Amino acid sequence: EALDASDQLTDILAIPEHLRDALWKVESAQIEPQDCPGGVVVAGMGGSAVGGALARAILGDTASRPLIAARGYGLPSWTTPDTMVLCSSYSGNTEETLACYEAAGALGAPRIAVTTGGQLAKQARADGVPVIPVAGGLQPRAGVAYMTVAALQVAALCGAAPRVTSEIDVAAEHLEALVMEWGPEGAEDSLAKSLARSLHGSVPVLAGAGLTVPLAYRWKTQINENAKIPAFAHELPELDHNELVGWAGASELGRFAAVFLDDADTHPRVKRRIELTEHLISGQATSTHVIASRGQTTVERVFSLVLLGDLVSLYLAVLRGVDPTPVDAIESLKAELA
Ligand code: F6R
């Protein structure tokens, strides 16, 4: 019942639909292609920044120019007047993103906004800056498909990467099957439900590598915001040079569960590191899991893990008896700052 009541669930199950709708939304903005030798900076925070990082992971080696998610009040120092700055804010009222919008303007860099409205849309319209619309009525973090597709399409429009429109379409179709498998209608022992049961009561620590680095971070942030518990994300191989020691020695602090996000393209030595790391911490962690992405294209593989992580975070919220939707702590902090 708690599940039925959650609009977060509805929005997660709608990810395939959001992917398709996002393509239309970008199309509707009728943005002229513009060659940007300086690459693309996606300026945004939280749920609106993750799309830039996921787009980067999806494009991988096919990106011929930098594509970077910038989370903060300023643009990277290498931003030039021929870098596209995509200002990504679901609400359009995030002060860090508005500061980047201004900074890009001062630099004379081309800008595009992706938002539902707010100050960002208002300012962009006044400045003649294109606005990519996003479906309203979601929590910003549930708009992940919109923000990712916008970043992918803008990268293509700027000559930074090939178009992946058809891959997005095909991925949306294949993801429908995963929605059935992992969603509430799926089996009680589906991967999503059993993983949530296994993580319940422990602090989840996520590990990504290569393509799955931003996914480990997405799982962490979704677990934070939906299940309302601490969770941490790091990446391999780096974590084998530091965090491993903390995990292996954590017995008296106890209760952490490790999740390694794996992919077909994970470096063979990293695969070996996952096995060994799992073994080394098995006495300390309450459980360890290696979860592989599903599908063929990188769009599909990335979104398979977005979907799974989002569902796991939601099931964790249900197991904890908390409402996944509100993020009161974020709202009150924003209000204090205003
Ligand atoms: C809330 C969420 C947050 C927001 C962030 C930035 O669901 O995910 O991380 O995304 O506070 O706000 P917006 O997205 O409105 O720019």
Image (spheres, helix red, strand yellow):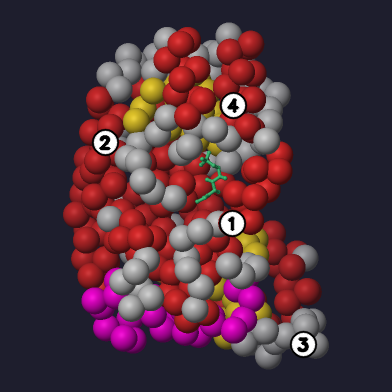
User: Along the polypeptide, which appears first: circle 2 or circle 4?
Assistant: 2
**Which residue position is annotated with label 3?**
251
Q: Residue at x 59, y 56 (%)?
A: 328
> Which span is picked out in magenta?
183-207
Q: Position of residue 231 (x, y in %)?
A: 63, 67
Q: Which residue is nearer to you in this view: 289 or 204?
A: 204
User: Along the polypeptide, which appears first: circle 3 or circle 2?
Assistant: 2
Q: Position of residue 79 (x, y in %)?
A: 63, 21
Q: Residue at x 31, y 71 (%)?
A: 4
**Which residue position is annotated with label 1?**
328
User: Along the polypeptide, which appears first: circle 3 or circle 4?
Assistant: 4
- The residue type indicated by label 1 comes to Asp
Residue 298 in the image: above or below residue 79: below
Report if the beta carbon of the residue with label 4 is closer than 8 angstroms to ligand 1: no
Which quarter of the image is occupied by the N terminus? bottom left
Q: Is residue 136 left or right of residue 326?
A: left
**Which residue position is annotated with label 4?**
98
- The residue type indicated by label 4 comes to Leu
C-beta proximity under 8 Å, tags 3 and 2: no
